[in-house]
Image (cartoon, rainbow, N blue to C red):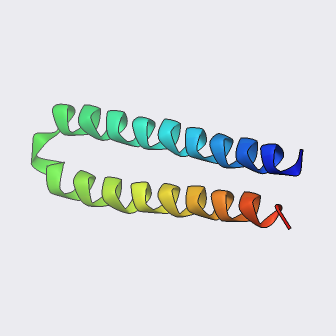
Amino acid sequence: MIGSIAALGAGLSVIGAGIGIGQIGGKAVEGIARQPEAASKIQTAMIIAAALVEGAALFGVVVSFLGLR
């Protein structure tokens, strides 16, 4: 039972990361479409934000698997 709860927590954190990265990418494309001259700044900010979301998702997965003990 505990293993399935940990798997559920890991799945939820990965789903959350997918939604977050999708939002980041979509808004970045909209921003670049509106202001193409700012593409490099927008891309840099997008990559940093995506890395932070991935880090939070990885933390969620690790914490959920630590609950297996």
Residue at 67 percent across and 49 percent down: it is 10
The relative height of residue 41 versus residue 19 in the rendered view (above or below) is: below
The quarter of the rendered structure image containing the C terminus is: bottom right
Residue at 17 percent across and 39 percent down: it is 35
Judged left or right of residue 30, residue 38 is left
Q: Nearer the viewer, residue 20 or 58?
A: 58
| Image spot of residue 20 (x, y percent) | 50, 42
Judged left or right of residue 24, residue 12 is right
Residue at 51 percent across and 55 percent down: it is 53
Residue at 75 percent across and 57 percent down: it is 64
The image shows a total of numbered marks equal to 0
Q: Nearer the viewer, residue 56 or 29?
A: 56
Asked where in the image residue 60 lies, by quadrant, the reply is: bottom right
Judged left or right of residue 23, residue 25 is left
The quarter of the rendered structure image containing the N terminus is: top right
| Image spot of residue 30 (x, y percent) | 27, 31
The relative height of residue 29 versus residue 43 in the rendered view (above or below) is: above
| Residue sticking out furthest to the right | 1
| Residue sticking out furthest to the left | 37
| Image spot of residue 8 (x, y percent) | 74, 41
| Image spot of residue 62 (x, y percent) | 67, 65
Judged left or right of residue 40, residue 49 is right
